[in-house]
Amino acid sequence: MPQKTPSAPRCVALVGPYLAGKTTLLESILLATEAIPRKGTAKDGNTVGDSSPAARSRKMSVEVNVASTSFMGEKWTFIDCPGSIEFSHEARTALMAADAAIVVCEPTVERAMTLAPLLKFLDDRQIPHLLFLNKIDDASIRVRDALAALQGVSARPLVLRQVPIREGDTVTGYVDLISERAYHYKPGQASDLVPMPQTMAEREKEARQGLLEKLADFDDKLLEQLLEDTAPSKEEIYSHLARNLASDRIVPVLLGAAAIDAGVRRLLKSLRHDVPEPSVTQARLGLKGTAPLAQVFKTQHTAHTGKVSIARVWQGPITDGATLSDGTTSAKIAGVTRLLGATVTKQAKGETGDVVGLLKLEGIATGAVLSAKGDVAAPSDAVGAWPAPPQAIFSLAVNAEKRGDDVKLSGSLHRLVEEDPALIVEHNADTHELLLWGQGEMHLAVALDRLRSSYHVPVIGQPPHVPYKETIRKGITQHARHKRQSGGHGQFADVKVEIRPLPRGAGFKFEEKIVGGAIPRNFIPAVEEGVRDYLKRGPLGFPVVDVQCVLFDGQYHDVDSSDQAFITAGGLAMREGMPKCDPVLLEPICKVAVTVPNEFTSRVQRLVQTRRGQILGYDAKAGWTGWDEVSAMLPQSEMHDLIIELRSATQGVGTFNWTFDHLAELTGKPAEKIIALRRPGEEAKKAAS
């Protein structure tokens, strides 16, 4: 490769599907750059990445891990991102800080589809990226077949940089298609340069021509050289490759096996020459402001240092003790740190391009752009705008195991959401539950583990109640009198009301038609208050909706009548009248839009129908080649674990958005079962009699 001047510190994100080997690759990179003396393994729980208890107990990445190192005299930061789709927002925010991404994947046809959402995000944001075909030593299929499957989910052309050398069924090395040199893998060390096998000559020539033709699609001069059978120089090819990678026009593909350190040093050398400078990334994102300038892409709360805002420095230096502002809030930095997984080292400043931990920036949120004067404008275009968290699709009702921990739980949840904006805390007014929303079962399981281990709040999580309602199907007239004499002033109130059903969605209406002073006007609001109080729990045990109450007559006593008496009478009228109005249970129905590759569309339709859903139709998803969006109406009671079954049926890539649409009547045995669960005491008495 041609010589180059040293670059400013650069940042690369390691992304890809679950179990692709990203954390193992990070270990190999850190070993090759001498940042660590030996590699750890997920099995032994001693890797630089996945250092949290939640990650190590599950042997999987559940949050981003930052590791800074150096290679050939240049500074690098690698961000190991979770592969599970439930933690995809963590990966997306990390990618906003990266100059490029390494998409780590396995050379298989079956799992190619799992890369589609990630590659779509990278292309939409114009983030330069390359593919690292990991575990190549155990590949059971040809690289060209794996590449064809991966090209099917990539909008950008995949450009093969290397071809494998096989000995029997094992890949033992590779041929670099630009330098035309052959290398033999040497576990734990740099690959050996070896003579090119004669059996590889034809395959190498064919693959090299394919590489040049793809590069020529973006350069007329190179195209002319190929048409004239003029061989471009290696320096020209390297230049074309770097320029097109930086512009997100192509996706170079390299081979390797991180478990045996194969291909890792060649990967690092490719990064060194091809990854764009921080200034190029800053311009792509459209970030501007008075230096020093930085953006926070991850927030953490640690026991020893408190709040840590992990940020990319776009214009430095950022020094310890400096004050930065996001335009609304200003905060003084209480320390600058360098990160190597869980190992934190204090330093005096962060230079342009560095990824640093900034301590104690209270009031500063993830995604905030910080500058000396706060003169920042968050980019709003599709490339630079901060990614919004995906809609929450799975929830648990959470409670502290100890009653005295309620306040502590509230504060801990606030910090948890600050660390992970894909989590949402909701106080549900209908069910009176504290709900924690997220992206799936694993996402919330990890969140509850963090509450227990990091914040020392033992919690219980359970499926939330469905906010059923009830209404009536016929109207009646009801008379109620409240009379009590207990010495001194008594209590007296007499009301006559008409209870009527209203159209679905109309809510509750109270009307009075009192004439002739049958009830003094100052007592009428008290009647309404009594009626409204009753509606919180109707004859079936649920909040009542779509009902009208008309107060048309009554009586009062000059001495014994009071607001409280008429409150009681209003509630009594409803309590006695509502059971006679043919009450019926209402269940919430949601409008759901399920997004899946079109090969799974029919499977999703069957899934919806087995959950009492109504298919409204399906169509191609806008902007997504080969994907459909299935629209349906689905009872909310059927949605709690929908995402679990959906992902199981779609290789983990299916997802959905939802919104409440309407309430629908629920009758028969399903309704009887729900009502019985609402009133277990009454059902037990009935069974006993």
Image (cartoon, grey):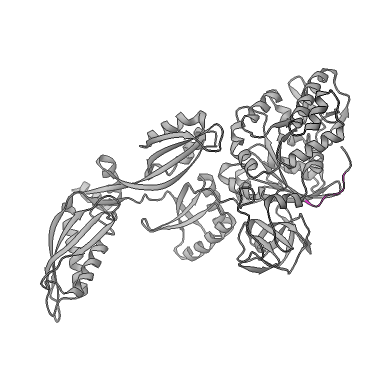
Residue 387 or residue 27, whichever sits in front = 387
Residue 147 or residue 54, whichever sits in front = 147
User: In the image, residue 535 lies at what x, y percent?
Assistant: 26, 59
User: In the image, residue 465 lies at what x, y percent?
Assistant: 38, 50
Q: Is residue 70 above or below residue 411?
A: above
Q: Residue at x 44, y 50 (%)?
A: 462
Q: Quadrant of residue 229?
A: top right
Q: Is residue 162 left or right of residue 625?
A: right
Q: Residue at x 67, y 62 (%)?
A: 370
User: In the image, residue 244 lies at what x, y percent?
Assistant: 75, 38
Q: Magenta stretch containing residue 595, yes or no?
A: no
Q: Which residues are magenta?
A: 4-9
Secondary structure mostly seen in magenta is: loop
Q: Residue at x 67, y 34 (%)?
A: 156
Q: Magenta stretch containing residue 5, yes or no?
A: yes
Q: Is residue 379 left or right of residue 69?
A: left
